Image: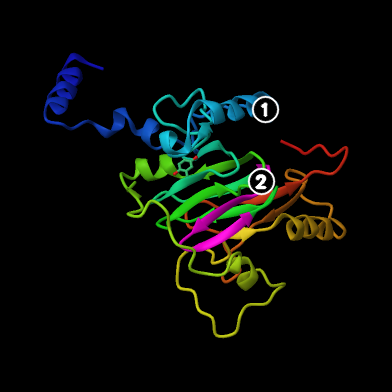
């Protein structure tokens, strides 16, 4: 840079501008550049710490009792990787976390415990181990564990960093703190999880899947059945996408989800 150029850059800066050629490679990389670093969070390391939160804070104090996953290279946002947030949420029998909604979309994978439930816009769902659940953007949702249950841990995934990056994250507490159950329990799965069948004449115009809960048993069965007729991907093993049954597409607009089965001895390629 000549002294004349340096002076020129300074003049531009004072006017709230800049010369594109000084930043072009940074803002338009040749290929996607992720600042996140690879990291493994081991459930064995985290489980006891997550359980300890049961004694330390109540759902009322915490709102959501969650230990989030922090990618060490992403100090500027709370992100596990990319623009995705993830955390481990824990609840004890008899507890209920109040209802709220936000423009971030959420999904959950049940890790352990019995008696968990979630209510999404009046659709109450019972949650078993390895079930997969959606709480799409804008839906009221609250979680709890039944009196007769055991401490439950599930993994949350949300597009919180993405919504914040878009300056679009609204958060609202339900006016009654808890919402009514306005449909039969587990009606979403009973209605939309039919084996290639959908209710005749039943419409759905929302931009997310009407099937809010994907139960583990049919999921595992689907993986095993597919594995009988495929070698799977050399990179991902037996790999299936959770889908919106009406479109065949992703479960929500901003986060999809898939499940992988690795068979004994299987080692996939990078
Ligand atoms: O359950 O609604 O882990 O709003 C982070 C933000 C869970 C939830 C999280 C949330 C929730």
Magenta residues span: 111-126
Count up the numbered dots.
Answer: 2
Q: Can residue 154 be seen?
A: yes
- Which mark identifies residue 149? 2
**126 or 25, which lies in front?**
126
Label 1 and label 2: CA atoms lie apart by 25 Å
Image colouring = rainbow
Q: Name the mark nearer the viewer: 1 or 2.
A: 2
Identified at 66% across, 23% down, the residue is: 45
Q: Position of residue 23 (x, y in %)?
A: 32, 30
Give above or below for 99 relative to 194.
Answer: above
Give above or below for 166 relative to 22.
Answer: below
Identified at 19% across, 21% down, the residue is: 5
Q: Position of residue 17 (x, y in %)?
A: 18, 32
Q: Where is residue 155 in the image (x, y as percent from the top left)?
A: 59, 41
Pointers 1 and 2 in contact (C-beta within 8 Å): no
Which residue is identified by label 1? 42
Reading the chain from its start, which is encountered first: label 1 or label 2? 1
Give above or below for 172 relative to 90.
Answer: below
Please indicate whether residue 117 sits to the left or right of residue 261 in the image.
Answer: left
**185 or 193, which lies in front?**
185
Please indicate whether residue 156 sits to the left or right of residue 76 in the image.
Answer: right
Please indicate whether residue 175 sits to the left or right of residue 75 in the image.
Answer: left
Query: Which quarter shows the N terminus?
Result: top left
Magenta stretch contains residue 158 = no
Give above or below for 169 relative to 70.
Answer: below
**173 or 212, which lies in front?**
173
Q: How crowded is mark 2: few (under 14 residues within 10 Å), some or many (20 or more)?
A: some
Q: Which secondary structure lies at badge 1?
A: loop
Identified at 51% across, 25% down, the residue is: 56
Q: In which quarter of the image is residue 22?
A: top left
């Amino acid at each position: 840079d000549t002294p004349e150029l340096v002076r020129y850059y300074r003049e531009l800066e004072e006017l709230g501008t800049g010369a594109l050629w000084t930043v072009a490679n940074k803002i338009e990389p040749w290929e996607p550049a992720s600042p996140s670093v690879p990291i493994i969070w081991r459930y064995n390391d985290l489980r006891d710490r997550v359980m300890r939160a049961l004694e330390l804070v109540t759902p009322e104090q915490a709102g959501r009792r969650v230990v989030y996953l922090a990618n060490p290279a992403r100090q500027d946002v709370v992100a596990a990787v990319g623009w995705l947030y993830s955390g481990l949420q824990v609840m004890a029998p008899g507890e209920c976390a109040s209802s709220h909604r936000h423009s971030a979309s959420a999904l959950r994978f049940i890790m352990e415990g019995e008696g968990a439930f979630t209510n999404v816009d009046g659709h109450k769902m019972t949650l078993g181990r390895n079930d997969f659940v959606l709480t799409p953007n804008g839906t009221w949702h609250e979680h709890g564990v039944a009196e007769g249950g055991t401490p439950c841990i599930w993994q949350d995934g949300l597009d919180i960093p993405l919504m914040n990056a878009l300056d679009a994250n609204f958060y609202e507490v339900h006016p009654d703190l808890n919402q009514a159950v306005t449909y039969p329990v587990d009606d979403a799965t009973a209605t939309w999880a039919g084996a290639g069948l959908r209710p005749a004449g039943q419409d759905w115009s929302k931009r997310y899947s009407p099937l809010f809960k994907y139960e583990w048993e049919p999921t595992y069965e689907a993986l095993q059945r597919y594995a009988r007729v495929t070698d799977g991907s050399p990179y991902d093993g037996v790999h299936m996408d959770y889908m919106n049954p009406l479109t065949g597409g992703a479960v929500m607009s901003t986060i999809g989800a898939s499940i992988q089965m690795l068979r004994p001895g299987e080692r996939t390629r990078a």
